[in-house]
Amino acid sequence: MPSAAQILFWGYDTSVNLKTDKLHSHDFWQVDFILDGNIEVEVDRKRIKVPPNNIIIIPPGKRHRFIYHDELKKIWSLKFEIENFSGDYAVTNFFPDFELGLIRDNIISILQKRIKSRSVTDVSQGVYVSNDELPQDNILIDHLLSAMLEKQYATKEVAKPKEAEFITATRRLIHQHNGKPVKVDEIAKKVGYSKGHLSALFAKHTGMPLKTFIDRERFFIARNLLLYYNAHISKTADMMEFPDVFCFSKFFKRFHGKSPREFIKKTRGF
């Protein structure tokens, strides 16, 4: 059974904010609970109708976009990562059976309580919350999402081989720093290898130096902050402890090919 999921973002949205997406993909899972609205999802040039009360699951790497045909829309959306659950999974759209319906209803119930605890009385324009603002009982949601993927995919797809533990542990440590600088020596010590040995393992298994892997993961964090948390460029640079915006922009462009400002202009976030 896969380990528990880790939520990156959850949100509730309605007609005020929702507009048809541009085709895009991301390196994490997405689950949407469609409560109301006339909605389609485009995947691989095919349009999938998503009627009210359906659940749609979008695996990492799948190019997709949501298409909205009317003003009345009510959607709960969660974006999350999950270790040891990798593979070439298909986008699924389904009306939940009793068990999956209970999972969905429990997740929504927890998030609704969180909205109330934040004193949000008018959700007509949507509520978007990053990982830092999740409720204390988000561990329950993590396990519920894990159970949903297990039930929906375990008997239908064959997972790829498990990622090497030292890679998983390194990625986890980088993300625990929330994108802040982390030294190779520090990673090696916590993972339990010498600096030279860990670097050699990364070169063998990933084809890249450990420092490049660290920087790439930091880029993913920066990209997600800009795209899904609506963080300003200067605030993101400060949060990730870059000396200044210029250094952050140079770093971002090295991996993306465009500056953060160009990235924001061409990519519609929440």
Image (tube, helix red, strand yellow):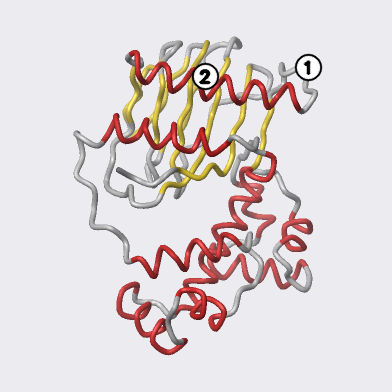
Q: Which numbered circle lies on residue 68?
A: 2
Examine the rendered structure and indicate whether residue 259 appears above or below residue 134. below
Examine the rendered structure and indicate whether residue 106 appears above or below residue 261. above
* Mark closest to the chain's N terminus, 1 or 2: 2
The residue shown at (63%, 70%) is 251
Residue 55 in percent (x, y) is at 41, 21
The one of 229 and 157 positioned closer to us in this rendering: 157
Q: Find disc 1 in the rendering and name its residue.
A: 121
The one of 61 and 175 positioned closer to us in this rendering: 175
Q: Quadrant of the C terminus?
A: top right
Q: Residues within 10 Å of mark 1 (few under 14, many from 20)?
A: few
Residue 27 in percent (x, y) is at 45, 50
The residue shown at (45%, 11%) is 52
Q: Residues within 10 Å of mark 2 (few under 14, many from 20)?
A: some
SS assignment at label 1: loop
Q: Which numbered circle lies on residue 221?
A: none
Amino acid bearing label 2: Tyr
The one of 23 and 144 positioned closer to us in this rendering: 144
Disc 1 and disc 2: Cα gap in Å?
25 Å
Considering every residue shown, the one lying at the far bottom of the view is 196
SS assignment at label 2: strand
